[in-house]
Amino acid sequence: DQQVKQNSPSLSVQEGRISILNCDYTNSMFDYFLWYKKYPAEGPTFLISISSIKDKNEDGRFTVFLNKSAKHLSLHIVPSQPGDSAVYFCAASDVSGTYKYIFGTGTRLKVLA
Amino acid sequence: SQTIHQWPATLVQPVGSPLSLECTVEGTSNPNLYWYRQAAGRGLQLLFYSVGIGQISSEVPQNLSASRPQDRQFILSSKKLLLSDSGFYLCAWSVSVGTEAFFGQGTRLTVV
């Protein structure tokens, strides 16, 4: 059972435009969410996180939005740059429960110059 | 600052051979430690996690095992590798729940 889902395996965006990556989750106990960026043959790099007490968190070009009622989060990258081309994973955890981070299957973002 | 070391970077092993991947964390005490695997074209699958020395939780029943002999050392092992064990193995650590996890550079394992 895939508790964290990224239904778009790939996304292409023009340089300078907005990239929107989406993530859905099924476990209502999840209360902490993260986004990671991964290049081939490297470990994922942490980008940004959000707690369930918030609905938005911003860090530079990256903004994460959380819609708890829809069990949906999204990552916005503005403006997109060619160096943003990578695979993006969302992850979720249950702060009051286990210590696990459950990851989605990833979305490959390609930013076109 | 905290760093995580994972080795080797690549490994080619024959079917039926043993496996030992090591991960160490520096600059922090009593971290939560994790082993993930990324199979070709798939997401990150949690294999094991540990919240303390000798405490191992297994997420996926398989022929792999994990051990934590020291506070900042996490080892992934197998007595006999299968072809299906091929993949990209990642070690990670976190300070506590509600914080981000940090990943090592990964080990590309190919079982032939």
Image (spheres, coloured by chain):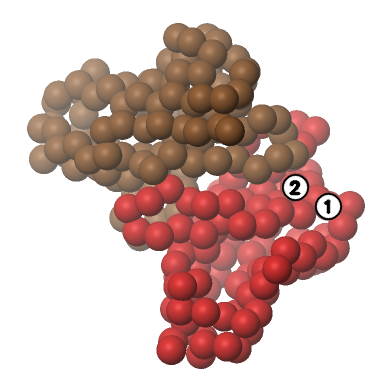
Chain colours: A red, B brown
- The x, y position of residue B27, in whole percent, is 57, 25
Above or below A86: residue B57:
above
Sequence order check, earlier mark of 1 and 2: 2
Report if residue B39 is visible in the image.
yes
Q: Are marks 1 and 2 in contact (CB under 8 Å)?
A: yes
In the rendered image, which residue does mark 1 sit on? A52
Q: Nearer the viewer, residue A90 or A36?
A: A36
- The x, y position of residue A80, in whole percent, is 57, 80
Between the C-alphas of marks 1 and 2, the distance is 6 Å
Which amino acid, mark 2?
Answer: Tyr
Q: Secondary structure at mark 2?
A: strand
In the rendered image, which residue does mark 2 sit on? A32
Which amino acid, mark 1?
Answer: Ser
- The x, y position of residue B98, in whole percent, is 75, 39
Quadrant in the picture for residue B80: top left
Q: Residues within 10 Å of mark 1 (few under 14, many from 20)?
A: few
